[in-house]
Amino acid sequence: MALPDKTVSRTLITSKLMQKHLLTYYIIILLLGVNISVYGQSSDTLQNLTLQTITITAFKEKPAEKNAAIITAFSLDSVNPTGNFNLTDRIAQIPGVDLLGTGPAISKPVIRGSYGNRILILLNGLKFDNQQWQDEHGLGLSDLGLSKVEIIKGPLGVLYGSEALGGVINLIEEEKPSRGQSASEFGLRFNTNTLGGLIQGGWQKNAGKHWWRIRGGIENHADYRNGKSQRVLNSRFTGYHLKGTFGFLKKNWRSTNNLMSSFTQSGFIFNDIYNFITPDARWSRNLSENPSHLVILNVLSSENKIHFAESDLYFNVGIQSNDRLENEGAGAISLNIHLLTFQYLLKWERNLSTKTRLIISHLHSFKINTNYGARKIIPDANLHEANASVYLETTVQPGIILENGFGL
């Protein structure tokens, strides 16, 4: 039966209204989708990091995605958005890495429960010694001039001696500018919890076959204030840092020579400190009367790579001077211990085939420990250590890599 004309007209009007409402709904949903997308992009930009191509320099020059080793890289830049006080705090942000410390200035990294002499620190391609066996001896290094940190876990420690059982932390200096370019930088950092911060600056230039760099910084902090706004008495610390680099390229020989010098002073923290120290002004940074650590560090090193037709030879050599003093109060120095370390690392790499790579490494170090103070926590001693290792890597097929190492 045919519908009345009014019903047909009403049906057409209703259909048009429904189409109009549907179109409106589509537009609203589309706008909401755009808004949600834009909002999500803004949020993700603040939370996510842009991954860049990572080249493993601690072990071998190879992209991380083609390496079977357990290596985690963490980029360092001049802008520190997390507000960390020292290098150890920033390293502790890496999953699987923690820190052990007594205050913001005295801390050391912990990898899977291992620390001290079980964690090896690589600085400019050589083992870094800072009397790390003591719980109250921090890492003592600044992130000044560093570009990246690599955490190496697993059996790769065979290449670096007996102190790499828990893992290896490789500290990588900033890259030189592009050929023919120079760069300068100045930075200022302030921490409200310590009413102090860091001021630093540097200049570097790449002239092609020669490049050089100089960088310096001063940090100074008052006593730390925790999350409950409570003052941690005598947690103040200060530091002076200076770095210089000169490198050159001559035919198949590339050499990078580094000089680093620093002086750090940090206060002792102990349970009954209020029985020995009278609180001074909140802004005070005086450490001449309060118990404190004083560390004078000097490092001279040379990294060298010689490229042959089918192999590469690496030769790193350096000397480190670490002088640690302890002020028991009123300026009296009771502990004065000096550790002098001379070492070299010789490594030869060769591709035996397109799928097999051989590495032979030899690490040799000689340490002299001398006490100059009345208090002695370890005796005068000479330590001689030599390590020889062989490493073989075989790519069975894409995605399957066999790594074998032997060290003596």
Image: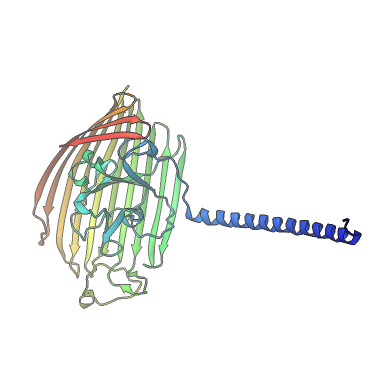
Q: Nearer the viewer, residue 212 or 253?
A: 253
Instruction: Give the vertical position of 206 relative to 239 (above or below).
Output: above
Q: Quadrant of the C terminus?
A: top left
**Colour logic:** rainbow
Please indicate, yes or no, whether residue 106 appears anywhere in the rendered image. Answer: no
- Give left or right: position of 206 versus 319: right
Q: Indicate the quadrant where residue 70 lies.
A: top left
Number of numbered labels in the structure image: 0
The x and y percentages for residue 67 are: 35, 37
The x and y percentages for residue 186 are: 44, 52
Instruction: Give the vertical position of 381 relative to 59 (above or below).
Output: below
Q: Nearer the viewer, residue 130 or 290?
A: 130
- Give left or right: position of 335 versus 172: left
Residue visible at 28% across and 58% down in the picture? 99
Q: Residue furthest right?
A: 5
Q: Indicate the quadrant where residue 317 lies.
A: top left
Q: Residue furthest front?
A: 1
Residue visible at 38% across and 59% down in the picture? 198
The x and y percentages for residue 284 are: 33, 71
- Give left or right: position of 7 versus 123: right
Q: Nearer the viewer, residue 94 or 77?
A: 94
Please indicate, yes or no, whether residue 80 appears anywhere in the rendered image. Answer: yes
Instruction: Give the vertical position of 345 relative to 266 (above or below).
Output: above
Q: Indicate the quadrant where residue 221 lies.
A: bottom left
Q: Quadrant of the N terminus?
A: bottom right
The x and y percentages for residue 154 are: 26, 44
Instruction: Give the vertical position of 165 relative to 387 (above or below).
Output: below
